[in-house]
Image: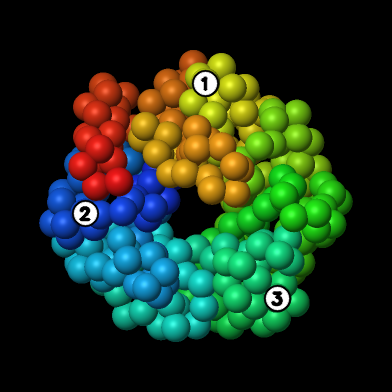
Amino acid sequence: MEGRVTYVECPRDAWQGFARTIPTEEKAAFLRRLLEAGFDHLDLASFVSPKRVPQMADSEEVLRLLPPPGGRDYLAIVANERGMERALAARNLTSVGYPFSISESFQQKNTRRSVEDSWPLVERMLELARSDGLELVVYVSMGFGNPYGDPWSPDQVVDFVGRLRELGVRRIAIADTYGVAGPERVHEVLAAVAAAHGTADLGAHLHSRPDPDEVRAKVDAVLDAGVRWLEGALGGIGGCPFAGDELVGNLPTEVVVPHLEARGLWSGIHTASIGRLTAEALDLRRRYS
């Protein structure tokens, strides 16, 4: 095989928009089944205001119910220092993710602070994470364009990633928050970042319509740029409200992982379990969305 790929399953992203709250034990039980099936990188919680994302209000308890990471990565999203404080106090957490948008409009909308005011926060979060043995993952939101007319170019993404690297941020994922970047743009941006800063600890969090050919084309664009970190969700669950297209969601794991294996890449996930887990994920959406 060509090598190992890091695949991040994102139940947090899938669940956070559900209208009804999934019981805590049911969340934890599903996450345990993911772990048993070889999913070793999970975006599973967030420490944000329960008023804004009520589905994630029980994140501390969900983490407490999981087995110790034991080399696996349990990630939670944070948006400010208050969220970081909760993360530092949580059990079993290994990484915190901060969504940092290139788009001024989206950064204000998502975190209620400007891009420029967010740089000191990233420095502080990096310091706090390191002091507690956590990894900081920065998601470069709107990394493939934005719907607001804010300035954007591949060179801007390269510069943004460069500034994060200079701060000491190791893990950076470029996110197609808008959900409409085609394979050509995905490859263009990632190849430009890779040429300037290398592919180590560089990831892609993409959205797509559920067409398997479109999904595989986007995965190929990532791989052909040399990037070996992708993210998605079983069933493609996880809406993209900014796209204006309710069919746009996360990359469906049940399409991505077999395609990775066809490309000679190993994720560590037991493919025989994916069908059953996809059905469970879709059932959760049926009952709680």
Label 1 amino acid? Asp
Q: Going 35% across and 61% down the picture, which residue do you hit?
A: 45
Between the C-alphas of marks 1 and 2, the distance is 28 Å
Residue 279's x, y, as percent? 24, 29
Residue 60's x, y, as percent? 26, 70
In the depicted structure, whether residue 241 falls above or below residue 186 = below
Q: Quadrant of residue 109?
A: bottom right
Q: Going 41% across and 83% down the picture, which residue do you hit?
A: 85
Residue 172's x, y, as percent? 61, 56
Residue 269 numbered mark, or none: none
Q: Going 31% across and 24% down the picture, which residue do you hit?
A: 271
Q: Pointer 1: what residue?
A: 211
Q: Is residue 132 visible?
A: no
Labels 3 and 2: the sequence-earlier one: 2
Q: Pointer 2: what residue?
A: 22
Between the C-alphas of marks 3 and 2, the distance is 33 Å
Residue 114 numbered mark, or none: 3
Residue 229's x, y, as percent? 54, 41
**Would you say 246 lies left or right of 76 here?**
right
Which residue is nearer to you in this view: 114 or 4?
A: 114
In the depicted structure, whether residue 216 falls above or below residue 19 = above
